[in-house]
Amino acid sequence: MIKCSNPDKRVYVKSFNINILISVIVFLGSLFLATSFVAHAAGLTEDSIVKAINATTGKDRANLFINFSRKFMSDDPEKSLEFAHQAEILARSINSLELLSDALKMEGDALFELDSLKASAMKYSESAETEEMLSNPRPDSLARRLSDAGFAFQELGLFDKALEYSQRALTISRSLNDTLEIASNLSNIGVSYKMTGLYGEAIEAFNQTLELDKMMGSQSDMATDYNNIGMVYRAWKNYDKAIEFFNKALEIDEKLGNRHKLSIRLSNIAQVYLAWGKTAESIEYLNSALAIDREMNATQKIAIRLQGLGLAFISLNNYPKAIEYFDEALTTFRMLNVEYQVAIILENMGDTYEKMNDFSNARKCYTESLAIACKINLKPTISDAAKSLYLLNKKHKNYKDALEYFETYKVAEDSVFSEASARQINEFEIRYETGKKENENRLLTKDILIKERNQRFLLTLIIALIILSGSLFYAFSLKRKSLQQSRILYEKEAELNRLKIDQIEKQNHHLQEVLFAEEEIKKLQLQSIEQKNHELTSATLLIANKNEVFENLRKMAEQVRINGSQDENEKIKEIIREINRQTDVENQWEQFRVHFESIHKSFFVKLREANSGFTQTDLQLCAYIKLNMGTKEIARLMNITPESVNTHRYRLRKKITLKTEETLDEFIHGL
């Protein structure tokens, strides 16, 4: 469970001056008016809303829009977004940074409710940037804006951006000594660390959250913290620790009577045991979770637990039992009309029937799974089901159907790959747009500041002219000149920022071109190595064939020599010597070795690092295995029997001291 920030509802008091007094009077008036309408929101009509809006102007109207946005947030997010957008337009027109920050925050909340995560994250970050540009930023509001932005980026999967905003929010929360917000931000930081594989940092963040929740005495939050720590250890494959923390969460939820959480905790423990290879324990915990879900009549959770039990029994090779659980889960998902789960369950059942050699039912399940997946455009399941049907038809030599399903499988697989690429591109665009928007916002707020300073300066000038007349006019002129210089400076900074943005865009384009070129070079190098390996293998096999022919000729010549005359024997000996010269295995090996090392330069060096006692025969055998030669081919090249090749392979494994699960071929190809 991820903790997220609560909406900002606090009122902040600033230092007293005339301008702020006026602002406070106006704000209180608009707040009173807005509160009156919100208090009677049950009777709000379009007419009453229009009348309320028409009765106000300026900041009063902007505050009214913000209050209406807050009122409609839960029941009608689209209406809430409309009011917040009107507040933003009005705040910009009257150059009020404080109202602009609040309006942008409300837009972010409404967009988040509407599941527009990207747009929501942009509004939250813009709200935070605007808040920072206030002459007296509200620390509590700024912390919550940053926290909201971090959470939205986390939901988008942009965990580096999420960490940036959450850490900034954490710094401010600590300065305010806001324990609840500190714990919330630490929890969000822990989730981002976990998702980026920084498990040590994630554990540290969750442990700090746990200490704060202990201090506040929040047992329910402590259970969540224990569960989060357990999830990190499970991802870390430290199953002992994962079980320890899941059990702590389970113990607290049992004590608090949180029945709705118990089945989740038990299911988490079951998943650890299944990954651990302790299937019996996994089944026991899944059954316990299932009993709770049945007691609470949590229909969809019941089906999910049944699916988990089916997968567990597959690992025990108890296929009939697995089918029994899958059938019950399938019935439930059909009743709930959860089609994507129906498609996945049917795929699981098809795999189970296939293991049982019940090809008729396997085909039936795969076909129905594929049909449902195509209907709802569930591409991963389309790919899996089509691939299973392709392999099944190929196995039964139904090549026409096999080809058809293979084409469906490849189209789905390519589509999934394309969508993954599109997500990466979208992520890049979000990062780029976020940075660009931050720069634009800084320029905008600087311009607003200049306008606000000019307005304050003009008011001061009028008062000064009434009180001091001509003597202060000179001071006013100097001040105005200073402001003009500031404007020129700001304009130059804006132009410099624009040039920097253009430069970054060009660098990004150049980087993409370089990455593409490097990828093409790697492909060409790989193709070149594969071609050279093929040529070397062909040449080596050709030599082996030649040696075999010469060996047969030598044996025939030996036979003729035994039965021939003296003169014939001399000629035959000369022929045998020529054959021996042509089949000089030692010389051929040296030539082969030179060509082999030109392709795989450090291969023999790495072999000797693994074991300095390798013989020439060992090196020769490893080289042939590297070229993917079979036992019979190696036997012909080394002029030994296939049984001798297997004996050499066995001795070679002992010299290298390979692990039981690692094959000799995997080791050699990994060099």
Image (cartoon, rainbow, N blue to C red):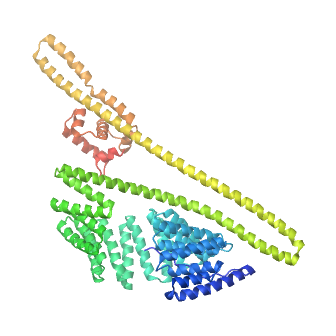
The image position of residue 24, as x and y in percent, is 68, 83
Q: For residue 172, say whether it is visible.
A: no
Q: Is residue 490 left or right of residue 278?
A: right
Q: For residue 436, say whether it is visible.
A: yes
Q: Quadrant of the C terminus?
A: top left
Q: Residue furthest top?
A: 567
Q: Is residue 327 left or right of residue 109?
A: left
Q: Quadrant of residue 255?
A: bottom left
Which residue is at 20% across, 19% downward?
576
Which residue is at 37% across, 41% downward?
608
Q: Quadrant of the N terminus?
A: bottom left
Q: How many marks?
A: 0
The image position of residue 514, as x and y in percent, is 50, 45
Q: Is residue 384 left or right of residue 514?
A: left
The image position of residue 246, as x and y in percent, is 37, 74
Q: Is residue 112 left or right of residue 291?
A: right
Which residue is at 19% across, 36% downward?
641
Q: Residue furthest left?
A: 563
Q: Residue furthest right?
A: 471
Which residue is at 51% across, 62% downward?
160
Pick whichever, 88 or 429, lies toward us: 88
The image position of residue 299, as x and y in percent, is 29, 78
- Is 517 above or below relative to 261? above
Pick whichever, 9 or 372, lies toward us: 372
Q: Residue furthest front?
A: 47
- Is 24 above or below relative to 570? below
- Is 650 above or below relative to 177? above
